[in-house]
Amino acid sequence: MKLTKIATIGTLAISIAGLSACNNMMPAKSADMKPPMHSQTMAKMNVVQVAQSNSDFSVLVEAVQAAGLAGMLADPNAHYTIFAPTNEAFMQAMKETGMTKAQLFANKPLLTKVLGYHVVSGDIAMYAKDVKPGNVMTASKDTLMVTNQGKLMDENGRTANIVKTDIPATNGVVHVIDRVLLPK
């Protein structure tokens, strides 16, 4: 249980750090991002609800539920930074790894580690202004690098662009990324 919580927190942190670093480089809005489906403002939602409110995160939401992490990520006392891959990013990762969604979701230890690699947990959530080039420890206890160009680089040398930053939540912040990050 501790490893799962740590992995999730790490993944959230990295996701937020990367998005924050790219805030000045990327447009504030992305034309292909769908608006929230809830009438509730995002600032009144936790990080899980923010993801649930946008259909571009439906695979991420399914993955979080399959890994059993939704309750932990809804913790009102947490300060998560989430680097949230889009559905397209998940489809690209599945092609790259040769795994189906069913295979990934059935492998709970792997799924938890991958999701944890997109979470950073700390005393405060990391908004774009707080993200600096360097290494960040994720909830999965793996290292994620923020490059000088404001991209996220995983331990395999793969990079993700932060396409939208600073989506506020009651227990953190969400940054949108265009690639699923994979720890070693």
Image (spheres, rainbow, N blue to C red):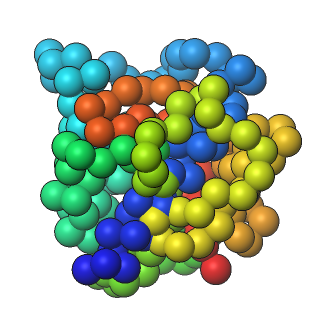
Q: Give the quadrant of the N terminus.
A: bottom left
Q: How many marks?
A: 0
x 48%, y 61%: residue: 10
Along the viewing direction, whichever of 78 and 146 lies nearer the viewer = 78
* Residue 85 visible in this rendered orientation of the protein: no
Seen from the viewer's position, the closer of residues 79 and 100 is: 79
Compared to residue 169, the image places residue 177 above or below, namely below
Q: Is residue 157 left or right of residue 79?
A: right
**Residue 98 in view (yes/no):** yes
Give the image location of residue 23, x and y in percent. Answer: 65, 25
Residue at (71%, 70%) from the top-left corner? 155
145 displayed left or right of 93: right
- Residue 173 in the image, given as x and y percentages of width and height: 41, 35
Position above or below: 136 against 174: below
Taking the view exactly as shown, the residue that stands out farthest to the right is 148
Q: Which quadrant holds residue 5?
A: bottom left
Q: Residue at x 34, y 53 (%)?
A: 59
Residue at 45% across / 51% down in the picture?
A: 122
Quarter in which the C terminus is drawn: bottom right
List x then y, in percent, for residue 137.
59, 63
Measured along the vertical axis of the image, is residue 53 above or below residue 121? above
